[in-house]
Image (cartoon, rainbow, N blue to C red):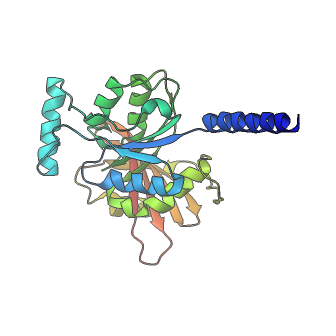
Amino acid sequence: MKHYILATLALLFTLTSCGTKEAETKTLILYYSLTGTTETVAQELQKALNADMEAIELENPYTGSYEEVVKTVGKEREAGELPKLLPLNADLAQYDTIFLGYPIWYGTYARPITALVEQNDFQGKHIVAFCTFGSGGLETSIEHLKKAQPNAQVKETGFGIRNARVASTAKELNRFLIEHNFIEGNVEALPGYSEMQPVTEEEKQIFDAACGNYQFPLGTPVLAGKRGTPEGVDYIYQVDNNGTPSTIYVTVGNAPDAKPEFTRVVR
């Protein structure tokens, strides 16, 4: 009788342990990177989450300079063509949450991601976008993900960082992950921005210092607000670019030699 009870308890423990393991959520970091910048963000994510990670690979990778790749992608868009992807090693069915990473091309996620979301069903999965960009595109790409995968749970807020600021990834990604409860930790809550007011001369000078050397014109600031943070001062600008409005975010660090940097454009 004693041996029977012990055997029964052992069986129950085994079944309970199996059930717990099956109930655990699994996370995959899945990304496409052309130049290695998006890969840098993916690697920081893996350090923080200790999750599985895989790069999306193409049968025929893009070659040439960045400008040449842009031209190739433009021709693909005009022709309605998509790059062919190599099969994934990861079984997507085994994951509950997917951090999906990509560079922004033509204002949205890169063409390999278009191919990925057309060829796979992410029904019921939690999708968290992360991206790198020249000026912006995170918000637009999330909206496109939601339309492409209506049965997935695409998180409204993702993580994005300019290529020029990728050195700040670790610190800013840590804040994002803590604020959205992906990892444990504490960060000081950021205050809201002040009420938008007509741009002052000082604010215009800060805007010009941050945006003046960008390769494309970003427009003229009309209104501005700001907030103090532990790292410095953040500015938000309402901008007019030949009749097209946009919002541009700029940050200035606390260091005496800190230069204004624009962090993203929302069009």
In the image, what residue occupies the spot 64% across and 54% down? 184
Q: Count the marks: how many?
A: 0
**Residue 187, picture quadrant:** bottom right
For this orientation, the residue located farthest to the top is 151
Foreground residue among 234 and 200: 234
Q: Position of residue 77 (x, y in %)?
A: 19, 29
Foreground residue among 90 and 184: 90
- The answer to whether residue 74 is visible is yes
Q: Position of residue 123 (x, y in %)?
A: 48, 23
- The answer to whether residue 101 is visible is no
Foreground residue among 11 and 240: 11
Which of the image's four quarters has the N terminus?
A: top right
Q: Is residue 136 above or below residue 233?
A: above
Q: Position of residue 110 (x, y in %)?
A: 28, 38
Which of the image's four quarters has the C terminus?
A: top left
For this orientation, the residue located farthest to the right is 1
In the image, what residue occupies the spot 24% across and 48% down? 34
- In the image, taking residue 25 as reference, residue 120 lies left or right, namely left
Q: Is residue 141 above or below residue 232?
A: above
Q: Is residue 164 above or below residue 98?
A: below
Q: Is residue 104 above or below residue 36?
A: above
**Residue 164, picture quadrant:** bottom left
Q: Position of residue 168 (x, y in %)?
A: 43, 62
In the image, what residue occupies the spot 38% across and 29% down? 144
In the image, what residue occupies the spot 46% across and 65% down? 252
- In the image, taking residue 79 as reference, residue 45 lies left or right, namely right
